[in-house]
């Protein structure tokens, strides 16, 4: 989230699109209720289904899954056409006036630079024109036909209300009502908040769904302000923490990136990071990258990381592909290229797409290690469950080792919520039986590996032998010790760069925050954005002070919000060019003539003058991006692409199949239904229910009783067409598999008309499997396609094609 859960109460308009907060985030949803009660805020829900969130909305608009970009670019088009733009904000705080290089084009659904064989782009034309002074060329009048604003205007022109209706199936009058309500928030004294989750991310163009809304929010002047922002509703606690500390195959902690094989040393690595400003006076905060990186290496490798060895740069793995996401990892497993899978807190067999492929992949392993407090399907992937897990156990040679672990409620530690708040928690129970904490298990594996390397050597034992391991009991690190390591320490006394007499941290002490990090090896820090969470003032994550000055919903003394305890990111943008709040009732920080002050930690240097330094300090241009230069793999603007399996042909780019840069593996192409397939005519989607949490709660009798049995949801119209009885049995199948389920015939799903064709939706909840107390069920991932988002490879769980027929009972 750019903002926080508690800040949602400050909004005028909540748009829940691409999520179902009332169902999946019922506790956080209370802030929507507060906004309605306190400010008379309105709620819009846009979802293929009439959800629990929709049931308390002011306006519900249906949409066909996988078409949100058309809808959102339609809203941008509407705002531009009707002059509902916060012009001063757009001119000063976005790259609207930046002139784009000659050679950039968008035609027939493709941007310039497309390479069909590689399914990838050469992005060199997706950039600004650079002037003789070395800075990006900007036309403040927005007259230049190649400036971002004019390119954007042309790009969105095709998404008229009629085209939105044709693609999305949203009736034009509904769309226009949404557009009117959204457009009102272009006023500097109105804010809209976007609450989204998997309905946007789980698509082959998921990242671009989110970009499209971020662009709309920028045009409305809603980023950086109270009650505004882009608010991702994260899933698992602790999935926000997971990405923050870099548990992705291509990341290091704090959104630093892993080197690739073309970067043989630290100099090469730094040459594509830590950019110089693209405009005069800008901060380009990633110029501090080296400090974050070197401090991380010191935390990892201690005294083995020295200036002479590039701070142990060689110890880091070098990527030869963009990333080893789960799709790639399981595809490699499928090809027999992976022997061992250590599965920690993950139920891969249930959670990943195309279960047949997942089963086949796990069957090729030599060893599968499952660390989990519960009995999972993954640890039992080799069991035969008839038609739906039709495997021959005797043919599977994979050895499975289960390591019983504790669950979060039995541990101390911190969880980072969607609003970036690190909240400490204390163990509430004693682990049963042989269960051990994850940290204990990991430490034991590490120590034993180290011992083996010490005895036997190996190709490159250094990273293991030299791993910094400073814990009082090496076999059992405590949560506090790890938290302090993440916060960082001064290894030598650190002084202020401007005033060397001012000591920031004495040698050996915890660092006050990331401003004290150095790139010469004198500081260590496990994750720079978390620095300040546990310093000499104590464990700031454990703070529980409900003081809320000015009732802004900031609660600055509750827990610790990264970075630097800032509650609203980009909060400099809440004030105009002179540093006065756009909306006096929604003040966050203001310029007092000498410095920035207010109830939040300024997201800018405290003395950076308002007219000079832009609010988006992480970008080298200091402004936000309506056009993303080379960041996104599938285009500097979002464009509507159909899901890989779609019930219609793309009306705006009929010759393009899905997102042309989506992650697809060679062998999977034949496993997709054709666009507008007659064999698989229905548009399926998958989702969660309040009564269950993924695949855990089916182990709990109460939850299993509340939602005992796998079902699919269909409209009354489709039921009538197919002769399916309410509560009758159906078979649902896709190009990849088949399930039987109870039919829930409901008014909450209605057929849509897209491109002149009736599109029926089949809704498939997630939660059943073959362990636990609930009845056996074989869920959506028997059916889902193996295709991922172009940028972050999230699988396309939310839009695929199926067929359905009534059957007499469950298939055994
Ligand atoms: N009770 C409970 N709560 C949970 C979880 C749980 O298992 N149980 N899981 C947690 C986790 S890990 C996560 S990630 C979050 C997920 O939170 P959500 O994303 O809110 O959950 P989902 O139910 O998967 O999907 C939300 C909605 O997206 C809609 N949708 C599908 N496709 C599209 C589309 O293309 N466009 C639009 N506009 N809408 C679409 C679906 O109809 C559904 O209503 O929930 C978390 N909260
Ligand atoms: N079709 C379809 N597929 C989906 C989705 C969808 O919407 N549609 N949603 C996707 C999403 S967003 C998610 S998050 C995944 C969820 O997929 P998973 O994360 O694989 O599902 P969970 O059941 O939450 O599995 C987490 C496991 O962690 C264990 N666990 C709990 N605490 C601890 C601990 O402290 N230590 C260890 N070692 N283990 C612990 C639990 O017992 C559980 O078995 O599913 C994904 N798959
Ligand atoms: Mo999730």
Image (cartoon, grey):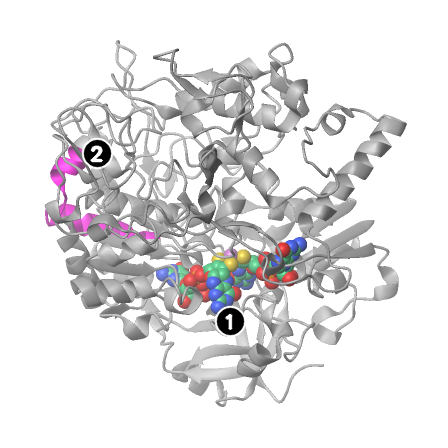
- Can you say whether 511 is above or below 589 in the image? above
Q: Residue at x 38, y 71 (%)?
A: 49
The location of residue 4, given as percent across then percent down, is 34, 51
Crowd tier of the residue under label 2, counting other residues whose Cα lies within 10 Å: few below 14, some 14–19, many 20 or above: some
Foreground residue among 151 and 619: 619
Label annotation for residue 509: none
| Image quarter of residue 443 | top right
Crowd tier of the residue under label 1, counting other residues whose Cα lies within 10 Å: few below 14, some 14–19, many 20 or above: many
The location of residue 311, given as percent across then percent down, is 61, 17
Q: Secondary structure at mark 1?
A: strand
User: Does the magenta-highlighted stretch encompass residue 409?
Assistant: no
Foreground residue among 30 and 411: 411
- Can you say whether 635 is above or below 171 in the image? above
Q: Earlier in the sequence, mark 2 or mark 1?
A: 2
Q: Residue at x 26, y 9 (%)?
A: 132
The total number of labels drawn is: 2
Mark 2 sits on what residue?
A: 597
Residue 353 visible (yes or no): no
User: Does the magenta-highlighted stretch encompass residue 78?
Assistant: yes
| Left-right relation of 355 to 208 | right
Foreground residue among 216 and 33: 33
Q: Which residues are magenta?
A: 69-91
The location of residue 526, given as percent across then percent down, is 55, 32
Magenta part, dominant SS: helix
The location of residue 686, given as percent across then percent down, is 49, 66
| Left-right relation of 595 to 506 | left
| Left-right relation of 314 to 398 | left
Q: Is disc 1's CB within 8 Å of ligand 2?
A: yes
Label annotation for residue 764: 1
- Can you say whether 114 is above or below 354 in the image? above
């Amino acid at each position: 989230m750019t903002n926080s859960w508690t800040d949602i109460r400050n909004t005028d308009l909540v748009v829940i699109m691409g999520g179902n907060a009332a169902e999946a985030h019922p506790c956080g949803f209370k802030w929507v209720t507060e906004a309605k009660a306190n400010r008379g805020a309105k709620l819009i829900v846009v979802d293929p289904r009439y959800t629990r969130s929709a049931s308390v909305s002011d306006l519900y608009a249906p949409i066909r899954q996988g078409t949100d970009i058309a809808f959102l670019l339609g809203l941008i088009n509407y705002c531009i056409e009707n002059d509902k733009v916060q012009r001063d904000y757009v001119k000063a705080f976005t790259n609207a006036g930046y002139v784009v290089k000659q050679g950039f084009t968008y035609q027939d659904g493709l941007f310039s630079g497309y390479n069909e064989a590689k399914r990838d782009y050469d992005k060199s034309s997706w950039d600004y024109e650079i002037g003789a002074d070395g800075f990006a060329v900007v036309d403040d009048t927005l007259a230049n036909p190649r400036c971002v604003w004019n390119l954007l205007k042309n790009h969105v022109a095709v998404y008229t209300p009629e085209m939105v209706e044709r693609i999305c199936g949203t009736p034009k009058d509904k769309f226009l009502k949404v557009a009117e309500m959204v457009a009102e928030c272009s006023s500097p004294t109105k804010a809209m908040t976007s609450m989204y989750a998997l309905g946007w991310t789980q698509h082959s163009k998921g990242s671009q769904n989110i970009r499209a809304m971020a662009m709309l929010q920028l045009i409305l002047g809603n980023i950086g302000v109270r009650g505004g922002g882009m608010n991702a509703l994260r899933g698992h606690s602790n999935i926000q923490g997971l990405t923050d500390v870099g548990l992705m195959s291509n990341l290091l902690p704090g959104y630093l990136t892993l080197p690739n094989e073309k970067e043989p040393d630290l100099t090469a690595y730094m040459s594509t990071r830590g950019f110089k400003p693209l405009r005069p006076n800008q901060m380009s905060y990633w110029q501090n990258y080296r400090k974050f990186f070197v401090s991380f290496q010191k935390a990892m490798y201690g005294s083995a990381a020295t200036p002479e060895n590039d701070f142990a740069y060689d110890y880091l793995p070098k990527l030869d592909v963009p990333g080893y996401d789960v799709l790639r990892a399981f595809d490699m497993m499928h090809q027999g290229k992976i022997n061992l899978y250590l599965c920690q807190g993950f139920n891969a067999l249930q959670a990943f797409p195309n279960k047949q492929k997942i089963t086949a992949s796990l069957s090729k392993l030599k060893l599968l290690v499952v660390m989990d407090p519960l009995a999972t399907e993954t640890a039992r992937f080799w069991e035969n469950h008839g038609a739906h897990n039709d495997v021959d156990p005797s043919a599977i040679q994979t050895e499975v080792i289960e390591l019983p672990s504790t669950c979060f409620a039995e541990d101390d530690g911190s969880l980072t919520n969607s609003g970036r708040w690190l909240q400490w928690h204390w163990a509430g129970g004693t682990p049963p039986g042989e269960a051990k904490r994850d940290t204990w298990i990991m430490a034991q594996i590490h120590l034993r590996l180290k011992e083996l390397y010490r005895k036997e050597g190996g190709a490159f034992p250094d990273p293991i032998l030299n791993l910094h391991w400073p814990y009082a009991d090496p076999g059992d690190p405590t949560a506090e010790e790890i938290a302090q390591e993440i916060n960082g320490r001064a290894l030598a006394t650190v002084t202020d760069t401007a005033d060397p007499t001012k000591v920031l941290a004495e040698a050996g002490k915890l660092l006050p925050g990331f401003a004290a990090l150095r790139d010469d090896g004198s500081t260590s820090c496990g994750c720079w954005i978390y620095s300040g969470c546990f310093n000499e003032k104590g464990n700031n994550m454990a703070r529980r002070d409900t003081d809320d000055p000015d009732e802004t919903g900031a609660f600055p003394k509750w827990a610790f919000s990264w970075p630097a305890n800032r509650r609203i990111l980009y909060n400099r943008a809440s004030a105009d060019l002179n540093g006065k709040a756009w909306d006096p009732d929604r003040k966050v920080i203001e310029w007092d003539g000498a410095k920035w002050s207010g109830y939040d930690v300024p997201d800018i240097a405290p003395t950076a003058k308002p007219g000079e330094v832009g609010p988006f300090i992480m970008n080298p241009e200091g402004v936000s991006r309506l056009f993303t230069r080379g960041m996104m793999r599938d285009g500097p603007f979002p464009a509507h692409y159909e899901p890989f399996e779609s019930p219609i042909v793309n009306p705006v780019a009929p010759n393009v199949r899905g997102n042309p840069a989506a992650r697809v593996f060679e062998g999977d192409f034949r496993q997709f239904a054709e666009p507008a397939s007659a064999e698989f005519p229905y548009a399926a989607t998958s989702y969660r229910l309040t009564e269950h949490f993924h695949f855990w709660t089916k182990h709990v009798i109460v939850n299993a009783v509340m939602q005992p049995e796998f079902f699919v949801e269909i409209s009354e119209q489709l039921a009538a067409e197919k002769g399916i009885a309410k509560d009758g049995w159906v078979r649902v199948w896709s190009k990849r598999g088949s399930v039987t389920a109870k039919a829930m015939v409901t008014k909450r799903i209605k057929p849509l008309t897209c491109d002149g064709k009736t599109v029926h939706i089949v809704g498939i909840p997630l939660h059943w499997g073959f362990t636990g107390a609930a009845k056996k069920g074989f869920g959506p991932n028997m059916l889902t396609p193996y295709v991922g988002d172009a940028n972050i490879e999230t699988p396309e769980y939310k839009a695929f094609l199926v067929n359905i027929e009534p059957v007499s009972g469950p298939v055994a």
